[in-house]
């Protein structure tokens, strides 16, 4: 009986450990400073082609460290990833998630952050969609056809930029 109980405990721990990062979505992103990020479905996360040390905070937030860089990967409610980085000397920013594997995003969608007067920012996507935010992160005008994924990415990018 003890052997069966120990075996069952070991098996349950093994299953729990194997599913610990099941929430990591397939992700490819580029960050300022020539930082390339790749995450396989379920992990691991690679920084510039090298496997990074992974820290799991919960099923929707992960940090990967390697080469003097910390990558923060969060999973939005729709399952799409958001990626940001912190580098040496406190440099930080939002990474561009390449949207080939993001539901509803469309192939090759990326965006640029453009600072605007009075402390606001504009998020401009390839394909013509742009969304503006005031200095408090309140969404303002927009143009072009913007998908729900783009609104979510723009909200996250603007919030990260303005904080």
Image (cartoon, grey):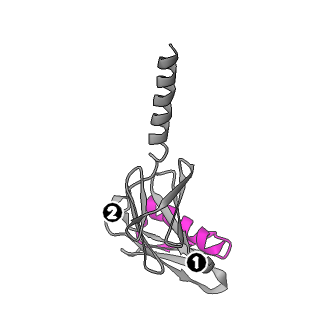
Q: Can you give x and y, in whole percent of width and height, for residue 55 in the image? A: 55, 55
The reply, left or right, for residue 54 in relation to residue 109 is: right
Q: Which residue is mark 2?
A: 100
Provide the residue span drawn in magenta.
Answer: 134-163
Vertical placement of residue 87 versus 19, above or below = below
User: Is 157 in the magenta?
Assistant: yes
* Residue 62 appears in the picture as rendered: yes
Name the residue located 45 percent from the left edge and 65 percent from the top edge. Answer: 150
Name the residue located 52 percent from the left edge and 16 percent from the top edge. Answer: 2
User: Is 99 in the magenta?
Assistant: no
Vertical placement of residue 74 versus 1, above or below = below
Q: Element type at marker 2?
A: helix
Q: Nearer the viewer, residue 104 or 60?
A: 60
Q: How far apart, in angstroms, are the residues tagged by discs 2 and 1?
A: 29 Å
Q: Nearer the viewer, residue 10 or 156?
A: 10
Q: Can you give x and y, in whole percent of width and height, for residue 34 in the image? A: 43, 79
* Residue 147 appears in the picture as rendered: no
Q: Residue 107 lies in what quarter of the image?
A: bottom left
Q: Which residue is mark 1?
A: 88
The C terminus, quarter of image = bottom right
Name the residue located 51 percent from the left edge and 51 percent from the top edge. Answer: 77
């Amino acid at each position: 009986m003890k052997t069966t109980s120990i075996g069952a405990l070991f098996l349950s721990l093994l299953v729990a450990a194997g599913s610990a990062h099941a929430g990591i979505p397939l992700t490819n992103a580029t960050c300022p400073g020539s930082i390339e990020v790749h995450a396989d479905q379920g992990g691991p996360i690679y920084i510039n082609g090298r496997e990074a040390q992974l820290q799991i905070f919960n099923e929707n937030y992960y940090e990967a460290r390697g080469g003097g860089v910390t990558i923060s990967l969060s999973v939005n409610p729709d399952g799409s990833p958001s990626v940001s980085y912190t580098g040496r000397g406190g440099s930080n920013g939002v990474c561009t998630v390449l949207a080939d594997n993001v539901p509803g995003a469309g192939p090759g969608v990326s965006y640029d952050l453009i600072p605007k007067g009075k402390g606001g920012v504009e998020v401009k996507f390839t394909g013509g969609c742009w969304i503006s935010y005031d200095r408090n992160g309140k969404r303002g005008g927009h143009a072009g056809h913007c998908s729900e994924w783009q609104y979510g990415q723009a909200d996250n990018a603007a919030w990260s930029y303005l904080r």
